[in-house]
């Protein structure tokens, strides 16, 4: 109906587009030929300022609920923040609502249950949440018979005693075989949600499933031939035509028959045409559409990325300022820089919002400390459920927001991982028409003794295609890298930053040297942080940049995050034991001397960064030191090794070392990558 009336499309085009979806034609406007789906398409999701549009609906019905809930929660925020005057919908009948439909089988799915729970919680807290849940009940979840559970127990009719689960959300029941009742009850539910900005629910009961669930569904295995034939003979269209003619006095049987035959013929023609259209045949097409295009950012100069040249540059700057240190040049811990760059981001991008659990008071690691007072509508707490946290973030993104989503502990991502995958594949599924750009902050990672294995995690198993994964080792790189991450997210990419617990407040590298404090890299006047700048980039760390501690061509340790600190400490031990030289700098010139073992800090982890490709082939041997567990499906750097080997860049002598393949005990650091692990690997690669 929306396509016919709102978009004024011809019925022939609508039928052809639906046929294209069923036969996965390359010309399908919804997915471009990768899946059978409805929604999305031109005129619906391309214009993110247009709230009156459809969103893609696939076979995983329940997973649509969390983002639909996010859109419902986001409507009011759009108006509060005045993000586009066309979105300030004043009249009641124009207020947007979010509608999502599922089957009775999906009422058992956690995506639906957690969404309904948060919708009820929003109403309890008087938070505007205009969403309508539509449930189609045909009594079958493929072969499993639900036996009226939805209408009798889960969501009973109003005249019966309500269950606690359905309290405070009105439930409308419609006869699923009567289109007039369907229209009437659906309109009532929509009007309620629109008027009160609250959730409602409508159950379409007693629907007869006329055909099998899918091509692989063998109905004869669980239904009798008599039952199957009875279901096929249940023609809901014919019964409603009788109702229209005899009760409503709408049309004649002849007129309805002619309409039916006309649509049937147009449908046949549409499927014939669609079935002859080309399918996707090139693998390269599947790779190109995985994510939005990366915004090109020039690499940082060597005096920032190469530690010896960085020290020489700092000495020159100190001489120019006569040794005086300004307030902006004061060194601090990584956590303080993270808070500052979040403040910088929220000031620069008005569509950016920060969502998480317990983030309004500062979060578990104080990263959001003080932000609520400065951005009262944009620091948003949700109850502890990662499925809805990630899902509503997806919905926010579909409305034009750029969410920053805090997962409080790395282990908690496991609880919402399916929704995370939905976010990752959305660009691929919709052929780039629906963008869900965001930054996911995964904290509580690697070396940290709080919570044991059920909080602190040392596995990065969930890195699906379409996600840029980064893990920074110091505050300076975090600031520059986060600026790049948020810019990429604004362009539609999904970026996940992984924060090592041990690094957040780390001050000292060796003894009490304050060696891990860094300056905040303030934005320079000469650089354009929106990309494409012709001047030298000193503000953003692009995905291809790597930091290098040393410039020898002997041996190197490739690592990231807290692995950088561990590797530098291992190098100090090797120097003190006489295995390598520790006389790293020429006191007179400040130039770096060869010490035989370089540390390469590689923050980008989704693929081998170009910066690593450019230098790794120069080494006689290399150690890949991963802070994650050894073994299949746990770590990142082991995937770099075959890629470098195929490209002829991998040195002949190499070793891989990671954390032991076990779990983390509470209050102990036994199971994290340690100095002794790297020393053992060094012995192997140099022997």
Image (cartoon, helix red, strand yellow):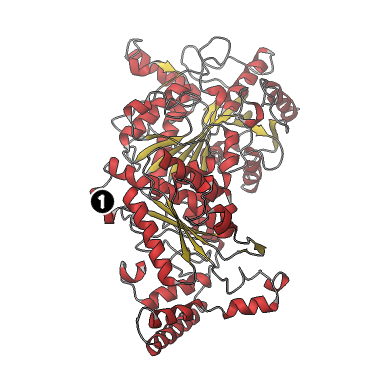
Q: Nearer the viewer, residue 439 or 193?
A: 193
Taking the image as drawn, is residue 620 in sight? no
Report whether 479 appears left or right of 460: left
**Above-or-below relation of 229 to 674:** below
Q: Nearer the viewer, residue 498 or 388?
A: 388
Label 1 element class:
loop
User: How many tags in the picture?
Assistant: 1
Q: Nearer the viewer, residue 656 or 149?
A: 149
Q: Which residue is mark 1?
A: 89
Residue at 61%, 47% in the rendered image: 647
- Locate residue 686: give its quadrant: top right
Q: Position of residue 321 (x, y in %)?
A: 32, 13
**Above-or-below relation of 236 to 129:** below
Q: Residues within 10 Å of mark 1 (few under 14, many from 20)?
A: some
- Locate residue 343: give its quadrant: top left
Report whether 452 appears left or right of 179: right
Quadrant where the C terminus is found in the figure = top right
Q: Residue furthest bottom?
A: 254
Quadrant where the N terminus is found in the figure = bottom left
Residue at 64%, 36% in the rendered image: 459
**Above-or-below relation of 482 to 271:** above
Taking the image as drawn, is residue 280 in sight? yes
Q: Nearer the viewer, residue 250 or 549?
A: 250
Q: Position of residue 641 (x, y in %)?
A: 65, 41
**Above-or-below relation of 534 to 68:** above
Q: Position of residue 652 (x, y in %)?
A: 70, 38
Q: Position of residue 615 (x, y in %)?
A: 56, 36
């Amino acid at each position: 109906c929306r396509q016919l009336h709102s978009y004024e499309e011809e019925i022939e085009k609508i039928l052809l587009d639906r046929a294209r979806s069923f036969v996965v034609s390359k010309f399908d406007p919804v997915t471009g030929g990768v899946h059978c789906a409805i929604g999305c398409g031109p005129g619906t999701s391309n214009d993110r300022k247009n709230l009156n549009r459809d969103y893609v609906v696939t076979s995983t019905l329940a997973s649509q609920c969390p983002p639909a809930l996010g859109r419902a929660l986001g409507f009011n925020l759009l108006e509060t923040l005045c993000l586009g005057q066309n979105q300030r919908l004043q009249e009641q009948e124009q207020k947007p609502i979010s509608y999502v439909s599922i089957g009775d089988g999906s009422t058992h799915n956690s995506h639906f249950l957690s969404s309904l729970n948060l919708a009820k919680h929003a109403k309890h807290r008087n938070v505007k949440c205009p969403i309508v849940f539509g449930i189609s009940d045909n009594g079958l979840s493929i072969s499993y018979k639900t036996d009226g559970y939805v209408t009798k127990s889960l969501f009973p009719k109003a005249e019966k005693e309500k269950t606690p689960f359905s309290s405070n959300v009105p439930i409308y029941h419609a006869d699923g075989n009567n289109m007039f009742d369907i229209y009437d009850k659906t309109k009532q539910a929509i009007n309620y949600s629109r008027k009160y900005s609250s959730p409602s629910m409508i159950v379409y009961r007693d629907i007869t499933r006329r055909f099998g669930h899918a091509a692989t569904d063998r109905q004869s295995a669980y239904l009798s031939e008599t039952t199957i034939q009875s279901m096929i003979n249940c023609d809901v269209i014919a019964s409603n035509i009788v109702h229209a003619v005899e009760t409503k006095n709408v049309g004649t049987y002849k007129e309805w028959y002619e309409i039916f035959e006309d649509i049937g013929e147009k449908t046949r023609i549409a499927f014939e045409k669609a079935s002859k259209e080309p399918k996707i045949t090139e693998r390269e097409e599947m790779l190109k559409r995985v994510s939005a295009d990366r915004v090109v950012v020039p690499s940082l100069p060597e005096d920032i990325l190469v530690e010896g040249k960085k020290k020489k540059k700092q000495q020159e700057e100190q001489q120019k300022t006569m040794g005086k240190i300004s307030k902006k040049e004061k060194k601090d811990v990584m956590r303080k820089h993270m808070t500052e760059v979040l403040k910088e981001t929220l000031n620069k991008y008005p569509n950016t919002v920060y969502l998480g659990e317990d983030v309004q008071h500062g979060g578990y690691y104080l990263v959001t400390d003080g932000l609520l007072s400065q951005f009262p509508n944009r620091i948003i707490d949700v109850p502890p459920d990662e499925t809805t946290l990630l899902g509503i973030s997806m919905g926010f993104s579909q409305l034009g927001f750029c969410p920053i989503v805090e997962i409080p502990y790395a282990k908690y991502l496991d609880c919402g991982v399916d929704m995370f995958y939905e976010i990752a594949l959305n660009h691929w599924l919709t052929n780039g028409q629906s963008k869900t750009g965001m930054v996911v902050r995964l904290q509580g990672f690697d070396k940290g003794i709080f919570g044991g294995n059920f909080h602190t995690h040392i596995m990065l198993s969930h890195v699906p295609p379409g996600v840029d994964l980064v893990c920074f080792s110091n505050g300076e790189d975090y600031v520059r890298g986060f600026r790049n991450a948020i810019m990429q997210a604004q362009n539609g990419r999904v970026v996940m930053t992984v924060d090592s617990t041990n690094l957040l407040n780390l001050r000292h590298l060796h003894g009490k040297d304050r060696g891990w404090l860094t300056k905040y890299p303030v934005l320079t006047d000469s650089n354009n942080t929106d990309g494409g700048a012709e001047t030298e980039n000193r503000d953003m760390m692009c995905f291809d940049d790597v930091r290098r501690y040393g410039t020898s061509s002997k041996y190197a340790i490739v690592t990231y995050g807290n692995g950088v600190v561990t590797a530098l400490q291992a190098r100090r031990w090797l120097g003190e034991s006489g295995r390598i030289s520790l006389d790293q700098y020429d006191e007179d010139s400040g130039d770096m001397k060869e010490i035989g073992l370089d540390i390469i800090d590689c923050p980008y982890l989704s693929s081998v960064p170009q910066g690593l490709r450019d230098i790794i082939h120069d080494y006689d041997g290399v150690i890949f030191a991963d802070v994650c567990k050894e073994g299949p499906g746990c770590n990142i750097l082991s995937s770099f090794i075959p890629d470098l080997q195929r490209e002829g860049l991998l040195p002949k002598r190499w070793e891989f070392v990671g954390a032991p393949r076990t779990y983390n005990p509470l209050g102990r650091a036994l199971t994290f990558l340690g100095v002794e692990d790297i020393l053992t690997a060094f012995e192997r690669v140099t022997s």
